[in-house]
Amino acid sequence: MAIVFKSPTGDASAWQPHFEQQIPEQEFRVYPDIGDPAEIDYALIWGKAEGFLKTLPNLKAVFSLGAGVDHFDGGAEMPEGVPLIRMIDKGLTWGMTEFIVMQVLFHHRDMIDYREQQKAKRWKHQELCPPWRRTVGIMGLGVLGSDAAEKLASLRLNVVGWSRSPKSLEGVTCYHGQAQFKEFLGRCEILVNILPLTDATRGVLNADLFNSLPKGAHIINVGRGPHLVDEDLLAALESGQVSAATLDVFHKEPLPQQHPFWSHPRIIVTPHAAADTVPESSTETIVQNIHRLEAGEPVEGLVDLDRGY
Ligand code: NDP
Ligand code: OXD
């Protein structure tokens, strides 16, 4: 019985001791040294699986090492009948909330202007906006978006959120579905995108969306690069419809050297660093799910491959 770890960026040695301690009956193997493929029960995957999963004849489940599962190409990588389970990890959730809160406050408190003013050695006090007069919108009220929304609401910001199905969150006005999308957007002075990348959400951050926001809105994209139509954002910044943006994710990562986002004065670029899965805490959730699977119980974070998240 063995678990195989495959990730182009993750450090297997950071995970191995936690698996060996928490589930010693499963040998921890690191791709490509997988031994006999027939002995592999579970796969821990980040990045493209590149056909590997279909070479494991007795695979019981696949665990994504991240919350996003877009790298599984809509399930094309998955062997028939094997469940795909996404990452739900308190370390990842709290890390994402930290990043979103930090960036929302950065935009709310005019830091992008102060950054430019400092470069020009200009002393100018921007007019303060009390938090209850600032509306922040969160697109995606799942595990990550809902935690961030509630924490932002606790700072007395006026928080609205949007999801596919109806939600009820303390201190947050919740909208759902296409029918309520425009009404939601019309309120968002700072808009955070934390949607999963699916056929339904690709390109959602486009000219039409920007034009539906209050003039001068700020954008924070921590979902995925292909949510954003890059040239539409540049045009919206040029016209002043969008005032500034924080971008953590990109169509191509690393962001190519010649990309205009790097040097744009109104864009903050971070290298897909908003939040990381924490091996220590996430091993616990994976192991709990393995025990649930073995007991025939429902798992947490089961991906609906038709829906794409
Ligand atoms: P969840 O599956 O828990 O939540 C997804 C949310 O998006 C749900 O509220 C869902 O609605 C909503 N949603 C999905 N499709 C639509 C749609 N078509 N219209 C409206 N709402 C929709 O995901 P997580 O919160 O765990 O993660 C979200 C994403 O964050 C990941 O997929 C990943 O891309 C990104 N991420 C980025 C990181 C970074 O470092 N930048 C780190 C980790 C994750 P409903 O609740 O109704 O299903
Ligand atoms: C994730 C990510 O999806 O880190 O977890 O992007």
Image: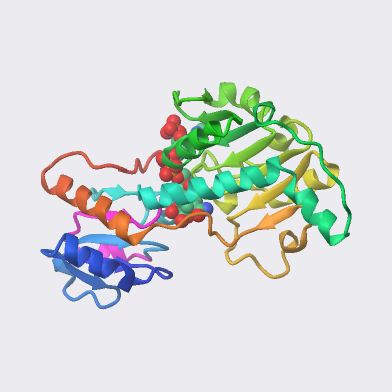
Q: Quadrant of the C terminus?
A: top left
**Which residues fall within the magenta stretch?**
50-67
Can see residue 78? no
Side of 242 relative to 271 (left or right): right
Quadrant of the image occupied by residue 121: bottom right
- Percent position (x, y) of residue 22? 18, 60
- Percent position (x, y) of residue 268? 69, 55
Can see residue 113? yes
Q: Nearer the viewer, residue 249 or 119?
A: 119
Quarter for ligand 2?
Answer: bottom left
Please count the marks in the image: 0
Identify the residue at image location x=79%, y=46%. Answer: 237
Identify the residue at image location x=34%, y=65%. Answer: 51
Q: Nearer the viewer, residue 291 or 135?
A: 135
Q: Is residue 299 magenta?
A: no
Side of 139 relative to 37 (left or right): right
- Is the residue 82 above or below the residue 149 in the image? below
- Is the residue 301 above or below the residue 49 in the image? above
Q: Quadrant of the N terminus?
A: bottom left
- Percent position (x, y) of residue 31? 29, 73
- Percent position (x, y) of residue 218? 70, 41
**What colour scheme governs how the chains and residues are painted in the rendered image of this protein?**
rainbow
Identify the residue at image location x=88%, y=59%. Answer: 120
Q: Nearer the viewer, residue 118 or 265?
A: 118
Q: Is residue 59 magenta?
A: yes
Q: Nearer the viewer, residue 118 or 59?
A: 118
Side of 62 relative to 219 (left or right): left
- Is the residue 256 above or below the residue 293 in the image? below
- Is the residue 25 above or below the residue 191 in the image? below
